[in-house]
Amino acid sequence: MNYKQLEDFYLFLLSKNSKIPCTKHGQYDAKKGIQICKYKNNYNIGFVADKNNCIVLDCDFDIQRNLNGVETLKKLEYELGTLPDTLTQSTPRGGKHLIYKDTGIKNPIGKIGKDVDIKYRGYITIEPSSINGAKYKFTNGIDKNGNFIIAELPNSWLNYINKTKNNFYKTIDVNNNNYQRKIINGNFQKMYEKCAFIKHCVDNASVLDEISWFYFACVLNSLSNGESLFDLYSRPHKDYDPILVNKKFQNAKKYNVNCNTISRCFAECKFCVYNQGGNYAK
């Protein structure tokens, strides 16, 4: 493939065989004009969604975890209408990235169901990248002249994806005299491995949204080393401020959250085998 047109987008370098940025500021170091052919044998390539005026429907696929994002979108098309053809690529694990223009996008949700991530203020790995020999590959949305076709989302899909900005704090159970937070010496590595929300917060620390960040603080308030962990995983964000981080962490002590609470902003919690509506502090 001739990557000349792709080089007109904002791109940045990822470490070879991974999705991890190899520049100091990650996606914020993205620039136009990266000569992909020059780097393709030694690096993977990151494509920044919002900086390229795009939004990506990232369809996961994992048979063992019962994930099939493509089927999820097909089912939703019966309700919202058919998605237009657009620039699409397959991923090494069998998933797909559908890349659309961000026209009409204001405040998008983070997920559709349990297996479609909405990438807007983040990035995706893009062709000619590869993981363990398996390649990212454009499969649709390129005309006979090699030009990319990036479509706009229909209004029905925009209305579904854009969320109304709510005061999420009103949905949290406010601490009262009958509630005493239990502080534990928890194993954070096990939490990371077993809890999709914790993993989401850590893996997306550089672009984490406000409400997820607040819930993350609420969860870590139950760990004896929670304050230091919260500061550590807040640092990758471009707006990191240690004073604001401490203030957020202290404020989170007033609130009691559980899996059900978090599922209001993080859809994958609704499908978690550990979600019994209990408190993380237990």
Image (cartoon, grey):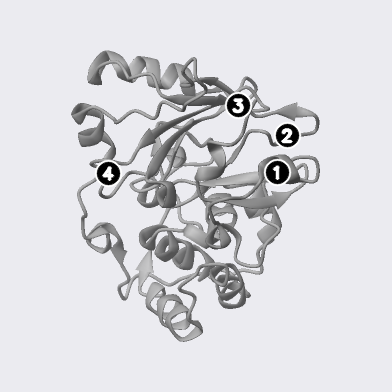
Q: Can residue 222 be seen?
A: no
Residue 245's place in the image compared with 134, above or below, is below
> Residue 63's quadrant in the figure?
top right
Earlier sequence position, callout 4 versus callout 1: 1
Q: CA distance from mark 4 to mark 1?
A: 28 Å
Q: Are marks 1 and 3 in contact (CB under 8 Å)?
A: no
Q: Are marks 2 and 1 in contact (CB under 8 Å)?
A: yes
Q: Are marks 2 and 3 in contact (CB under 8 Å)?
A: no
Where residue 169 sits: x, y (%)? 27, 63
Other residues around mark 3 within 10 Å, as few (<14) / some (14–19) / many (≥20): few
Task: Give me the residue at 67% from left, 42% from top.
Answer: 36
Earlier sequence position, callout 2 versus callout 3: 3
- Check disc 4 and give the amino acid type: Ile
The foreground one among 24 and 117 is 24
Q: Which residue has dot 1 on it?
A: 44
Between tags 4 and 3, which lies in front?
4
